[in-house]
Image (tube, rainbow, N blue to C red):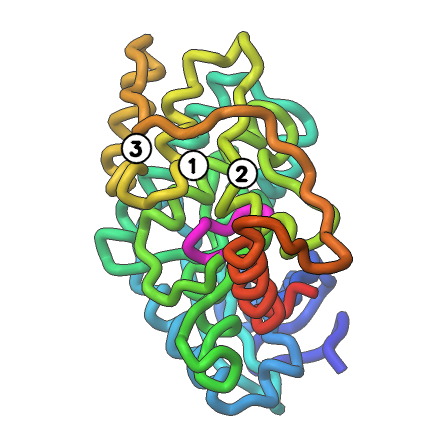
Amino acid sequence: MIGPGRQLGKYHILEKLGAGGMADVWLAEDTTLKRQVALKILPPEFARDPERATRFEKEVLSSASLQHPGIVTIHDVGHEQGVHYYTMTLLPGGDLKQKIRAGLSPQQALKLLHQMADALDHAHGKGFVHRDLKPENIMFDGREQPVITDFGIAKAVGSGTKMTGTGMSIGTPHYMSPEQAQGLADLDGRSDLYSLGIILYEMLTGQVPFDADNTVGIAMQHVQAPIPRLPQSLGKLQPLLERLLAKDPGQRYQNAGELVQAIDDALSGKLPAPAAKQPVQKTQVLKAEKSPPTGKGSGLKWAVGGALLAAVLVGGFL
């Protein structure tokens, strides 16, 4: 049983910092180096699967090669007494979700977006795709600088032949890209940029752009719903948002470096280039239908819905 006072290898567990679907987070002391670290422990149901546990360690070791001030430093990965874990730099400044709740100015939001995009540009250049960007995975260090955590973890614990047969991974529903919502396996950095677009909208307005009363409904909105309008006072940022949230990856910024330049332009007063035309209106909450419709076009709608439902079910979000 994991808890305060337990020794896990050279780590003395002090207190629980948080819990999530992919890992529980503990404050621990490295008794060799005499420093505090964040200790992330893989859930038991994942650790019992040898293939997934091995993949977890491989992905963490691989992501440890990322060296950037905007990406958390991985210190160690291992397993002890059947518990699989990794340790990373302790980030004392809370997460982005907390700052969104407190309120951010447009200038603060753009500055944070710039810093996150710069970190992604580094990671994507090394061949890494995050797959699960969300405010809870963006922490702050002691200097109040954003630091992206959990690179590769979504792929490690959320995919594999036993789960999907395709190697696909699914992100958190409110922040997943249309490609993820449709269960596509071949994701690239543009999927992360879409997730950044969701985060930008949330930083500017305090709410996510797409919502519904169930996970499948949220996923369908990512695929089908028009991009919502920002409030009139933020209208100059609409082209930037629309490029990030384009349904077609080919209409988005093609890499994070392009996004960094667009943010620089926005901060200097230049208008971002718009994406190709897409319908724009306020998003409506989709209600799950109780019986299949029979009208024209209903077959396609239900085929898409069925694919999304299957993807979400294997991703473990229901």
Check residue 177 for magenta coloring. Answer: yes
Residue highlighted by disc 3: 259
Q: In this view of the protein, which residue sits in the foreground, 304 or 5?
A: 304
Residue highlighted by disc 2: 225
Q: Earlier in the sequence, mark 1 or mark 2?
A: 2
* Quarter where residue 254 is shown: top left
Q: Position of residue 86 (x, y in %)?
A: 51, 71
Vertical placement of 272 versus 251: above or below? above
Vertical placement of 145 versus 17: above or below? above
SS label for mark 1:
loop
The residue at the point 59 percent across, 84 percent down is: 47
Q: In this view of the protein, which residue sits in the foreground, 4 or 225?
A: 225
Vertical placement of 107 versus 225: above or below? above
Q: Are marks 2 and 3 in contact (CB under 8 Å)?
A: no
User: Magenta region's main secondary structure?
Assistant: helix
* Quarter where residue 253 is shown: top left
Distance CA(mark 1)–CA(mark 3): 12 Å
Local packing at callout 1 (Cα closer than 10 Å; few below 14, some 14-19, many 20+) is: many
SS label for mark 3:
helix
SS label for mark 2:
loop
Let me know if residue 99 appears in the view.
no
Q: Earlier in the sequence, mark 2 or mark 3?
A: 2
Local packing at callout 2 (Cα closer than 10 Å; few below 14, some 14-19, many 20+) is: many
Per the rendering, the mark at residue 245 is 1
Eye-nearest disc, 1 or 3: 1
How many numbered discs sit on the rendered protein?
A: 3
**Mark 1 is on which residue type?**
Leu
The magenta stretch is: 174-181
Check residue 75 for magenta coloring. Answer: no
